[in-house]
Image (cartoon, helix red, strand yellow):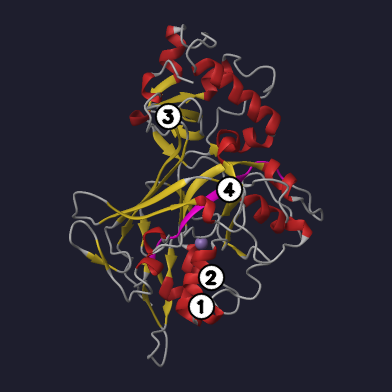
């Protein structure tokens, strides 16, 4: 399937006509609208909506605003109808109504380089899971020894914590090194100051499109239906703050200062043919967590790191989303299992995605093995954790036959800490 927009047809392009991810862009005239990506262009969906392209499915405009929440709330039938309309407008030999309309084309199609991508949706609440078995095993081995690496509940329950929506930011937003309370193992008392062990977590975020009802649990199949799409997610982590604060209620300030996501929500529809099963189960899951079909995806993931003075980024990890033990649908079903209401715009972090090999680890904590095995960037600089001025970039794609369903980048540069006065 080709598009009449040539830049969409390259084999490594992240945004071919098969993808059509949704985002929010600020154009040069300062207006923020919902858009979709195709090749090196963005399509202004508010413009198409105003011209009646999504009639009759959308009766009240949803795209002339800086968030996709209202569109997501309309549900899978409308998501699919809009996707079908866009596909027809953008494929070769499809509906010529955009291709052959010069003035509309000039207004509705903008170069990606001329827009600023914003947070694609209003994040209602953010929950982060711990569903990567290799990551949990690595971290458990470091802190509790290989014998007790996985906590006793891990093979039965998708472990998570409630994070902060207020500090979820779009790719490209600089991240200030956090301050916090830490205690060195040999110190008598804790101190307050800049984090010394700043880390990333390579994750993907599931974006909840539909809400659920308080008091009513969801099946895994219902949960899957409610997911609108997926983004890349970097769960920035302050390991020294986390080590001192986390018992008994889990991470708090160590994770609250920033979470970065990629600007494009890749829809579940675009990922459909890349569905794969989650890994074999060591323990049979309780019925409410059992999957009726393949609920994970085959998505290649990479992490790059670049110092402030280096000319080129170094790839420090290459792994796959299919390493996750629990799918996003299972996480969402578990989240609602007590009767917890889930909302349009909820963001579920997958947990750090590490593969079995050292080259596949999704955090610096694992790559440098608790800081004991520093690694070297191509610029010759050594790292265990993140230094000020370093840029960390996540990227990923599902590989089709001659095309990619890409997620673009999720990037952030670390700024020096604010001077602590406490
Ligand atoms: Mn995390």
How far apart marks 1 and 4 lie (CA) works out to: 27 Å
Label 1 with label 4: CB-CB less than 8 Å:
no
For mark 4, what is the residue? 206
State which tag comes first along the sequence, 3 or 4.
4
How far apart marks 1 and 2 lie (CA) works out to: 7 Å
State which tag comes first along the sequence, 3 or 2.
2
State which tag comes first along the sequence, 3 or 1.
1
* 359 relative to 129 in the view: left or right: left
Observer able to see residue 413: yes
Q: Is mark 2 within 8 Å of ligand 1?
A: yes
Would you identify the image quadrant in which residue 316 lies?
bottom left
Label 1 with label 2: CB-CB less than 8 Å:
yes
State which tag comes first along the sequence, 1 or 4.
4
For mark 3, what is the residue? 402
For mark 2, what is the residue? 251
Mark 4 or 2, closer to the camera: 4
């Amino acid at each position: 399937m080709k598009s009449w927009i040539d830049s969409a047809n390259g084999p490594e392009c992240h945004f071919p006509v098969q993808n059509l991810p949704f985002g929010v862009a600020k154009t040069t005239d300062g207006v923020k609208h919902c858009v979709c990506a195709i090749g090196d262009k963005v399509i202004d969906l508010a413009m198409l909506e105003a011209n009646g392209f999504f009639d009759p499915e959308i009766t009240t405009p949803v795209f002339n605003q800086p968030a996709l929440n209202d569109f997501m709330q309309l549900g899978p039938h409308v998501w699919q109808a809009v996707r079908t309309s866009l596909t027809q407008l953008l494929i070769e030999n499809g509906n010529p109504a955009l291709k052959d309309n010069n003035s509309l084309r000039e207004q509705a199609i903008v170069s990606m380089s001329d827009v600023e991508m914003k947070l694609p949706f209003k994040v209602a609440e953010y929950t982060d899971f711990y569903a990567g078995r290799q990551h949990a095993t690595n971290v458990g081995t470091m802190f509790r020894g290989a014998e007790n690496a996985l906590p006793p509940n891990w093979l039965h329950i998708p472990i998570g914590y409630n994070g902060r929506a207020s500090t979820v930011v779009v790719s490209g937003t600089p991240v200030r090194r956090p301050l916090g309370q830490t205690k060195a193992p040999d110190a008598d008392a804790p101190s307050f100051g800049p984090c010394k062990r700043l880390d990333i977590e390579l994750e993907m975020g599931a974006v909840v499109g539909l809400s659920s009802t308080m008091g009513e649990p969801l099946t895994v199949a219902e949960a899957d239906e409610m997911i609108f799409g997926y983004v890349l997610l970097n769960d920035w982590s302050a390991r020294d703050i986390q080590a001192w604060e986390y018992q008994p209620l889990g991470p708090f300030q160590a994770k609250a200062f920033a979470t970065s996501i990629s600007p494009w929500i890749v829809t579940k529809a675009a990922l459909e043919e890349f569905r794969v099963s989650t890994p074999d189960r060591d323990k049979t899951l309780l019925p409410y967590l059992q999957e009726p079909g393949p609920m994970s995806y085959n998505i290649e993931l990479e992490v790059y790191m670049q110092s402030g003075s280096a000319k080129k980024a170094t790839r420090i990890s290459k792994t796959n989303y299919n390493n996750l033990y629990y799918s996003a649908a299972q996480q969402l079903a578990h989240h609602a299992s007590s009767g917890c209401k889930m909302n349009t715009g909820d963001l579920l972090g997958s947990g750090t995605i590490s593969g079995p090999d050292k080259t596949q680890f999704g955090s610096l904590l694992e790559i440098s093995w608790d800081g004991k095995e520093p690694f070297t960037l191509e610029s010759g600089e050594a790292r265990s954790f993140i230094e000020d001025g370093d840029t960390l970039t996540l990227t990923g794609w599902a590989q089709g036959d001659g095309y990619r369903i890409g997620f673009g980048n999720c990037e952030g540069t670390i700024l020096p800490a604010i001077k602590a006065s406490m």
